[in-house]
Each structure stands twice: as structure tokens, then as C-alpha cells.
Image (tube, rainbow, N blue to C red):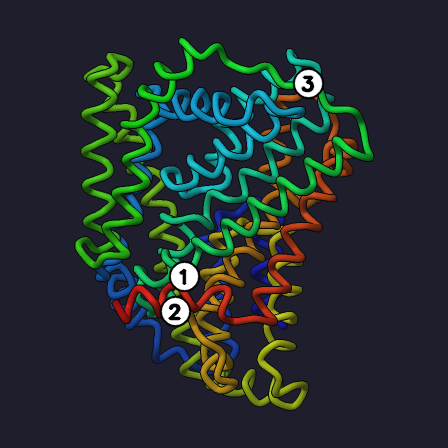
């Protein structure tokens, strides 16, 4: 309890999360007569970063930064409008499809919501869509970023849970497509029973071919990543390097990326990478201290006394992740909670790949859940509206995502079938 009090007190005082985690580890050692471990902290801190899989984090961050600066994201938006813009509520569907395509590139929900909010919310308002509805579609579709591969959260889960990253990437494909389907269903229901959605505006045929042709090259990036990993031709890290190179070449070819932009892009990637890897290292120290004291074993015994059902366990984890996600950033939740729960996963026979998908979706929902919800704040600024109306409009979309998450808890094949198929081939 003392450790938890210190941890949350430091967080509420504005202390950096990585510092709060380290302070919690030191307090735990001090209150449990583990001072002998102090000298080993630097070794554990450094050892947590000696993992090849961590190289994928800056590479996929680099892909996202180049995509945004190089105008590739805008071309994907134009392609989506050509494909579904002619239907009633077409721009809402285009918003969803663009997010699905961008998810294969950006890998981060906050980054994706930030990019798409700047473009889609003003455009939807201009075409007559309700402001809250526009924000809700953008926010909920942005959740696809960490689910459809590549995924920053999947990389981090793979590192802290000591699981291969390639199967985790593949495991996100089916759940991601299911979420796209249910979100499209919510948009359809809005059009049928809720506020009337504007009629679509088809793109003239002579312009459609040019737009589609311009979107082929940016569309190659997610194709290279997914096909390369599923075929075994590339590791996730190698696919990130190839995707970065393709994005860089296209950015220069389109003449929207300049050499002068590269220092700023690299600086942003470096700072964000340092933040994430610092969190991973601090959480590794904390998990190591807890394991030394036998806390994971105690947790296994406690949960075993409550339930021996993998489904009930996953539902309890979902509830825990949702609550923590309301207050903490999703990466922090994964880094702190997953290492502690992995012994329970093993004891109950839960597939680690299924567990990773459940944890990823559950934590990402917290990005758009009050009271913190950074995704909501981003959309609030772009839509210039308070949180209340935006969250009320977002609630039906979140309910649909939550329904998919419950289905994944109940039916492991939804997340494990495709990785098993890829491995068998």
C-alpha cells in the first residue's frame, strides 16, 4: 500500500511516470528489507533495453512522421473519398477507411487522432455533418492505430511479455477488421435512426483515376509491412526500416518533404523513443523487484481463488485496463501491468497472443475515456467543443468496440487463428 500511495501521489503531483515507477520500486525495496538490490538497479535498467525488438519502435515512429510531413496521409484520404464518398454519409465512411489505412502506417492512436482531427473534422463540418458526430467518428476510428499492424503497443507488449512481435502484429488484423465493420455499422445506424447524414458527393470519373493512381504508392507501405511479416520475408524491425525508406523516397518524389524537415523529424522520433524506452526500463526494474519478493506468485494464488476460467480472467483484466486507462497513458498501463499478470496467464493456460490483443484494445479505449482521455482532448481542440457532447456522441462507437473486445475474450480464435495459419505456412 505504501508503494501504491507513493506512486499515485507522485503522478498526481505531475512527476514523470518513469520517475514515479522507479520511486515506487525503491520504496518497495526499502519497506521490504531489500536494500541489497540497490546496486543491481543500473544493471536491470540497462538490460531491459538490450532487446532487438525495441529497434522497431523508432522505425515505425519515423514512418508516421514522414507520412505526415510528406503528404502521403492526405493522398490516402483522397482515395477513401473516391471509394465511399458517393454514399449517404460517405465522408464518415471515408474517415473510417482512411483511419484503417493510416493505422497500417502510424501505429499510434494519439498520433492518428491528432493527424486525422486536423483534416477530417473541419472537412466534415464544412459538408454539413454534426460537429460532435464528426469528432466521434474521428476519435473512435483513431483507435485502430495500435490494433491494425504495425502497432506500437504490440511491440511494447512483446518486449515486456517476452513474446515474438510478428505473431502479435498478425493477430491484430482480424480484430482490426471487426472493429472497422462494427464502427461502419454504427455510422449506418446513425443514418437510419439518428441524425440525418448528408448525401454523398461522388468524385467525377476523370478525377477518380488520377486520385486512385496517386494513392497506389502510399498504399504500398502497409502492404509491404503486412505481407513481408506474414510471409516471413522480413522481421517487424526490418519491415519498419523498409517502410521508412519507401516513405522517405515518396516524400521527396512528391516534393512535399524537404531536407530541412529531416532534423525536426529525427528529433521528434528520438525524444519519443527515449520517453518510451525509459518507461520500459523503469517498469522492468519494478517488475524485477516484485518478482524477487514473490508478488506474481501471490497474485496467481489470489486470482486462482477467485476463478479458474480464462474468459472470466480476461474480462477482469479488461475491466482493470479500462479503469487504469482512464487515468494513465496506455503505454504506461501495459508496461506496469503485463509483467505482473504474465504468470497468471501461464497458470490459467491463456494464449499470450490473445492476451496481448485483449490488453492492447482495452488500454487503447482509455485514450478516449474521461477523465484524462488524451484522444478526446485532441478532438475537443480541433472541434472547439466541450468534452460532454463529444463523449456522448462517441459512446455508441466505444460500445461497439467493447463488444468486439468481449468477443475476443470469449473466442480465442479471433486473435490466434491468423498467426497460427501464418506460422503453419
Residue that label 3 marks: 199
* Element under disc 3: loop
Q: Quadrant of the N terminus?
A: bottom right
> Can you say whether 276 is above or below 161 in the image?
above
> Can you say whether 193 is above or below 107 in the image?
above
> Can you say whether 414 is above or below 99 in the image?
below
> Which numbered dot is residue 161?
2
Report the side of 390 relative to 332 (left or right). Answer: right
Report the side of 2 relative to 128 (left or right). Answer: left
Marks 1 & 3, CB-CB < 8 Å contact: no
- Residue at 68% across, 18% down: 199
- Residue at 46% across, 24% down: 77
Mark positioned earlier in the residue sequence (3 or 2): 2
- Residue at 23% across, 47% down: 239
Inspect this view and state whether residue 330 appears: yes
- Residue at 64% across, 11% down: 126
Marks 3 & 2, CB-CB < 8 Å contact: no
Report the side of 16 relative to 138 (left or right). Answer: left
Inspect this view and state whether residue 66 appears: no
Report the side of 145 relative to 420 (left or right). Answer: right
Q: Quadrant of the C terminus?
A: bottom left
Residue that label 1 marks: 157
- Between 263 and 173, which is closer to the camera in this rendering? 173
> Can you say whether 98 is above or below 368 in the image?
above
Mark 2 closeness class: few <14, some 14–19, many ≥20 residues within 10 Å: some
User: What percent of the width, then of the height, locates residue 197?
Assistant: 73, 24
CA gap, disc 1 and disc 2 = 6 Å
Amino acid at each position: 500500500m505504501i508503494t501504491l500511495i507513493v506512486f499515485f501521489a507522485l503522478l498526481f503531483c505531475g512527476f514523470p511516470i518513469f520517475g514515479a515507477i522507479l520511486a515506487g520500486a525503491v520504496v518497495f525495496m526499502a519497506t521490504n528489507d531489500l536494500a541489497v538490490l540497490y546496486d543491481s538497479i543500473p544493471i536491470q535498467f540497462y538490460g531491459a533495453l538490450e532487446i532487438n525488438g525495441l529497434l522497431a519502435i523508432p522505425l515505425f515512429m519515423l514512418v508516421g512522421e514522414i507520412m505526415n510531413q510528406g503528404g502521403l496521409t492526405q493522398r490516402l484520404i483522397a482515395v477513401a473519398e473516391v471509394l465511399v464518398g458517393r454514399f449517404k454519409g460517405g465522408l464518415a465512411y471515408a474517415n473510417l477507411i482512411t483511419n484503417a489505412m493510416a493505422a497500417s502506417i502510424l501505429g499510434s492512436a494519439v498520433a492518428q487522432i491528432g493527424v486525422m482531427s486536423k483534416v477530417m473534422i473541419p472537412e466534415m463540418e464544412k459538408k454539413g455533418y454534426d460537429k460532435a458526430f464528426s469528432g466521434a467518428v474521428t476519435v473512435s476510428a483513431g483507435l485502430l492505430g495500435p490494433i491494425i499492424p504495425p502497432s506500437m503497443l504490440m511491440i511494447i507488449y512483446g518486449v515486456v511479455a517476452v513474446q515474438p512481435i510478428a505473431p502479435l502484429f498478425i493477430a491484430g488484423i482480424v480484430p482490426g477488421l471487426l472493429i472497422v465493420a462494427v464502427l461502419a455499422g454504427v455510422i449506418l445506424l446513425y443514418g437510419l435512426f439518428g441524425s440525418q447524414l448528408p448525401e454523398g458527393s461522388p468524385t467525377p470519373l476523370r478525377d477518380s483515376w488520377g486520385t486512385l493512381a496517386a494513392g497506389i504508392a502510399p498504399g504500398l507501405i502497409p502492404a509491404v509491412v503486412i505481407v513481408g511479416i506474414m510471409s516471413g520475408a522480413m522481421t517487424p524491425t526490418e519491415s519498419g526500416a523498409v517502410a521508412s525508406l519507401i516513405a522517405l523516397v515518396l516524400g521527396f518524389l512528391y516534393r512535399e518533404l524537404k531536407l530541412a524537415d529531416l532534423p525536426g523529424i529525427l528529433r521528434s522520433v528520438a525524444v519519443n523513443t527515449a520517453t518510451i524506452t525509459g518507461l520500459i526500463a523503469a517498469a522492468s526494474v519494478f517488475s524485477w523487484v516484485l518478482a524477487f519478493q514473490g508478488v506474481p506468485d501471490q497474485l496467481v494464488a489470489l486470482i486462482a481463488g477467485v476463478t479458474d476460467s480464462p474468459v472470466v480472467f480476461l474480462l477482469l483484466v479488461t475491466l482493470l485496463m479500462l479503469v487504469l486507462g482512464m487515468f494513465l497513458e496506455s503505454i504506461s498501463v501495459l508496461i506496469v501491468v503485463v509483467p505482473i499478470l504474465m504468470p497468471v496467464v501461464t497458470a490459467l493456460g491463456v494464449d499470450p497472443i490473445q492476451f496481448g490483443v485483449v490488453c492492447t484494445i482495452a488500454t487503447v479505449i482509455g485514450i478516449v475515456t474521461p477523465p484524462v482521455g488524451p484522444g478526446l482532448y485532441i478532438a475537443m481542440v480541433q472541434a472547439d467543443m466541450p468534452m460532454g457532447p463529444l463523449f456522448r456522441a462517441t459512446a455508441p462507437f466505444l460500445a461497439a468496440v467493447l463488444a468486439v473486445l468481449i468477443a475476443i475474450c470469449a473466442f480465442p480464435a479471433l486473435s490466434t487463428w491468423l498467426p497460427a495459419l501464418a506460422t503453419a505456412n
